[in-house]
Image (spheres, rainbow, N blue to C red):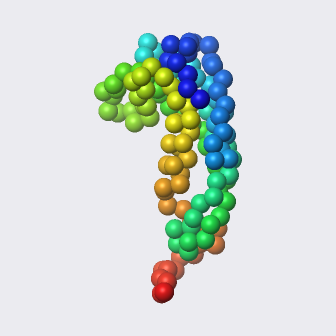
Amino acid sequence: MVILFDKINSTPKPISIKSDNILLDGFLTKSGYHRVSIKASLQGNIELSCDRCGDNYMFNFDKNLTLTLTDLISEDKDDLDIIEFLDNKIDVKYILDGEINRVKTSFHYCKECEDRDEDFEMEF
């Protein structure tokens, strides 16, 4: 889903897109001359691999997302929640895929491993 930056105004524009069984549902709103804010929820289930035992399990994805989007190069080093779209097009699928990949590349433990305190060593 690609939306032109110029098509967003102060009236919230609803967005809804699904990827990898995760639904992004929310609004885009103009928040400044070259800024748009996105407020959305991410919900669904994705399969992850436990970083301790290697078993696959389903992870319940339920998160609120608040980001600032800009069509200029951002020099604000204090705000890391800014995404630049320099071609004047907001790619909502890119945002969703980025959030899914951020979760997939983090460390995760399945329910059995997150309660264990002992050291884990496996011999093959």
- Front position in the image: 43 or 90: 90
- Figure quadrant of residue 92: top right
Q: With respect to residue 67, does 97 lie above or below? A: below
Q: Is residue 34 left or right of residue 59?
A: left
- Front position in the image: 1 or 41: 1
- Figure quadrant of residue 46: bottom right
Where residue 59 appears, x then y in whole percent?
A: 65, 57
The mark total stands at 0
Where residue 123 appears, x then y in whole percent?
A: 48, 87
Res. 38 in view:
no
Q: Is residue 12 left or right of residue 118?
A: right
- Figure quadrant of residue 108: bottom right
Q: Residue at x 35, y 33 (%)?
A: 78
Where residue 42 appears, x then y in whole percent?
A: 63, 41
Q: Residue at x 51, y 36 (%)?
A: 94
Where residue 105 appears, x then y in whole percent?
A: 48, 55
Q: With respect to residue 104, does 112 lie above or below? A: below
Q: Is residue 70 left or right of residue 45?
A: left
Q: Residue at x 61, y 71 (%)?
A: 55
Q: Residue at x 48, y 86 (%)?
A: 124
Identify the image quadrant of the N terminus.
Answer: top right
Res. 11 in view:
yes
